[in-house]
Amino acid sequence: MPNTDPSHTISVLVANKPGVLVRIALVFARRGYNIDSLVVSPTVNPKYSRMTITARGSLETLDQIIKNAGKLVDVIHCGEHDMAHSVEKELSLVKLKASPAVKAFVTKAARKFHVKIDDSSEKYYIIEQTGTTAQLNEFETMAKEYGVVEMVRTGKILMVRGKEKT
Amino acid sequence: MADGYARATGRPGVVLVTSGPGATNTVTGILTAHMDSVPIIVLTGQTITSMLGKDAFQEADIVGITMPIVKHSYLVKNTNDIPRVIKEAWHICQTGRPGPVLIDLPKDITSAPFTGDTLDPKMDIPGYKELPKPDKHDVLKMAEMFKGSKKPLLLVGHGAVIARAGDAIKKLAEKLNAPVTNTLLAKGEFPETHPLSLGMLGMHGTAYANKAIIHCDLILSIGSRWDDRINGNNLEFCVNAKKLHIDADFSEINKIVKPDAWVVADARETVEELIKHATPLDTKEWLAELAFYRKEFPLKYKNDRGLTAQYVIDTCYKVTDGRAIVTTDVGQHQMWAAQFYLSGRGDHWISSGGAGTMGFGFPAAIGAQFGRPKNLVVAIVGDGGFQMTLHELSTMFIHKLPVKVLIIDNKYLGMVRQWQELFFENRLSGVDLEGNPDFVKLAEAYGIKGFHINHADHCQDVMKQAMEYPGPCVIHAEVIKEGNVYPMVPAGKSAFHMIIEKPTEKMEKPTGST
């Protein structure tokens, strides 16, 4: 059954130490929050890493998760962000069996969905797309009509607009 | 033991164990300290770094195993990091909301020479949040809430004990003319003999404290986390009262109860600020109402069908003049001790609350006696829990610690039996301890003096001898087998459903947690 709880994007700035990921994951798992995607990446300061997590669940549980993750000694900052005040991006690779119809479909979708064929060896296309999660979802639905062989997505990253830091 | 030391002294208790099973044996103790916010440092041995993750002899991933129950933990991989790690652990475990910190030390790391620059390095914990000072605006908002309250109630929790907020709370209560109730862990921080004290609230709290919960129009929690053993059912808890919350931990705000005003800061500092803005309230009628409940529903017991645990504990209280440091185990005796051994100081009552760890009481008493060698320390334990850690009798003997171990022996795991009797038609299962050892002989086998009580007539004399005995001793009190703890609020129900004595009708199965 699809999870219908609202989706939240949580950004966590953490000390770059072993085991931090487990500590954060435990805060989610203990409270039954399902993580949809999780991106860990370096920051400009090598001492810190950034985690961007999308997860589904109730607002009350989210409040507890943010407070309890924020309490961890290795967590510098933890907070939720909404789309209105931030820029979000995600990248996906979609593999489709090569055919003139698929090529036409990709060419047509290129401008609207920021897609391009990255690789066309051995009669398969690997199509790269960068965009918002919603854009990626939409393209995925369309691509499915042509038979998606496999798909890999990076998960969402996000940055707060303007002067404020993420 | 380290936990008892920490609670009795306010200083961190330190545990040192070997790797593998030595490390895993600390898990229950770490959970106990975690649930009750006790500062302990656990130093665990570990296999050499080159063998980590290769199933070496006595290897256990203790950092992984304990991750959900520590405040913080370390796996040290460089000898020169040891001074910094110890300094950080010492700071983290006892500041803010205290808790356990584990340091895993591979053998090659502890045996290598230290070649660092300094033994007093800078801490490197940029993510650690120090406790903020009470926010003036938040305090004022809270003080405003008191205005017009006719039925205020102060709820003192373990956070107040940790912050040593007792004197400030006394001033506040006396200024407001507000009655005070306490959680199990906060016994004594506001003296239970004070006229404004209602004693402990909750599942086995006093009837008058629970009546106060039902009828108050304002409740201020000072360092209590509104645990399910006190609220019963958070949706029905104090529905008509303004709820105010002081806590050192931001994540406690809104967790169980949604407060109308809150302050996240040290309990003592906050209460001291609050006193400045507090004005006396007219609580005459409220106090009279509570005095009526106190008279109508006192804590009581009958002694007509044999020796009761309540009488033994009451006698211990009177013989020691209420001045002992009391540690308890978990179960019926714990609740009776909470009801009948009134406490006058927060650090004179040591009990496992959140975790409810059986086997806690006796080792905790040893730790408390190490930390407070001049005090009389009494461990009140049940026959079930005592047998989980009784091997510490040798520790007590070896170190000549004059702890008095009062074993309340009803030959049952009594609290579980009580639930089976009340909620499961007395179909008893796994609670029978008929076949207990002779605890006097057991003590003697360890070279420890044993006393025996099985009748009310000589209870006081024997108790006096035992409490005045200069060395360690065990008092084996054989009490009636089927005594129950009342009052009782069934798990998952609000205080409204409290029963004062044995029910005549069949009880519903409890909906709350075990």
Image: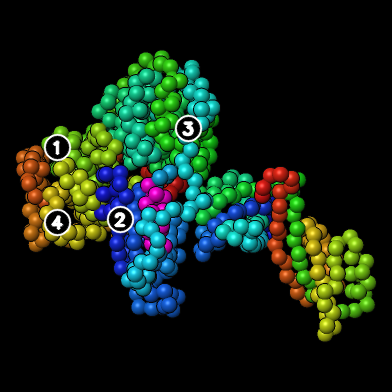
- For marks 2 and 1, give the CA distance: 30 Å
Residue at the image position 17 percent from the left and 46 percent from the top = B373
Q: Amino acid at mark 3?
A: Pro
> Which chain's residue wears label 3?
B
> Which chain's residue wears label 2?
B
First in sequence, mark 1 or 3: give its number. Answer: 3
Instruction: Residue A152: give x, y in percent of width and height.
Output: 73, 70
Q: Nearer the viewer, residue B134 or B58?
A: B134
- The magenta stretch spans which residues? B81-94
Badge 1 and badge 4 in a common chain: yes
Q: Amino acid at mark 1?
A: Thr
| Furthest residue in direction bottom, as rendered | A122
Badge 3 and badge 2 in a common chain: yes
> Which chain's residue wears label 4?
B
Mark linked to residue B399: 4
Residue designated by label 3: B134
Residue designated by label 1: B320
Badge 1 and badge 3 in a common chain: yes
Mark linked to residue B14: 2
Q: Nearer the viewer, residue B12 or B450?
A: B12
